[in-house]
Image: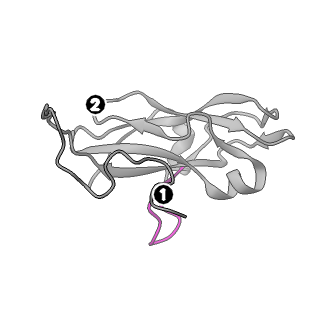
Amino acid sequence: MKLDVKILDARLREQLPKYATLGSAGLDLHACIDTPLTIKDGQTILVPTGLAIHLSNPEYAGLILPRSGLGHNHGIVLGNLIGLIDSDYQGELMISAWNRSQKSFILNPFERLAQLVIVPVIQAQLNIVNEFPNSKRGTKGFGSTGK
């Protein structure tokens, strides 16, 4: 699949998103900032990526996901948990970075902050029914299948 990418900050030509390994599912997204930025404990900020994408095909969407090392080691996760990029969105990708830790974190210019994963999408057609057919689980919810 080819992904249309618009570079909004010329510095990104040297820091294009890439897959870290052959097996990587996500393209690394960088913090497109001029100077180090302190994210205080508990603070949420929007960080620009300096690029826009256009998927154009409604059978695909983009997901912005946190980097596991930043979350585990420093408490830096996404403020919205997962960012959903619809196929028709063409604006700059922004990363909602939340410092859930108890201490400040310094984000450096062009540091890898999140990752972009492209996923297939199925747009469902609603079928209104009065009842569902019986299933083993039925309406049993949380914890109903055991540990």
For image coordinates 33% across by 34% down, the residue present is: 86
- Please give the label number shown on residue 88: 2
Q: In this rendering, which labeled residue sits more in front, label 1 or label 2?
A: 2
Q: Residues within 10 Å of mark 2 (few under 14, many from 20)?
A: some
Q: What segment carries the magenta color? A: 19-28
Residue 83 appears left or right of 47 = left
Seen from the viewer's position, the closer of residues 86 and 11 is 86
Residue with the mark numbered 1: 18
In three-dimensional space, the C-alpha distance between marks 1 and 2, rounded to whole angstroms, equals 22 Å
Identify residue type, mark 2: Asp
Identify residue type, mark 1: Lys
Residue 43 appears left or right of 28 = right
For image coordinates 53% across by 43% down, the residue present is: 12
- Image position, residue 129 (x, y; %): 13, 34
Question: Which badge, 1 or 2, is on the more N-terminal residue?
Answer: 1
Residue furthest bottom in the image? 22
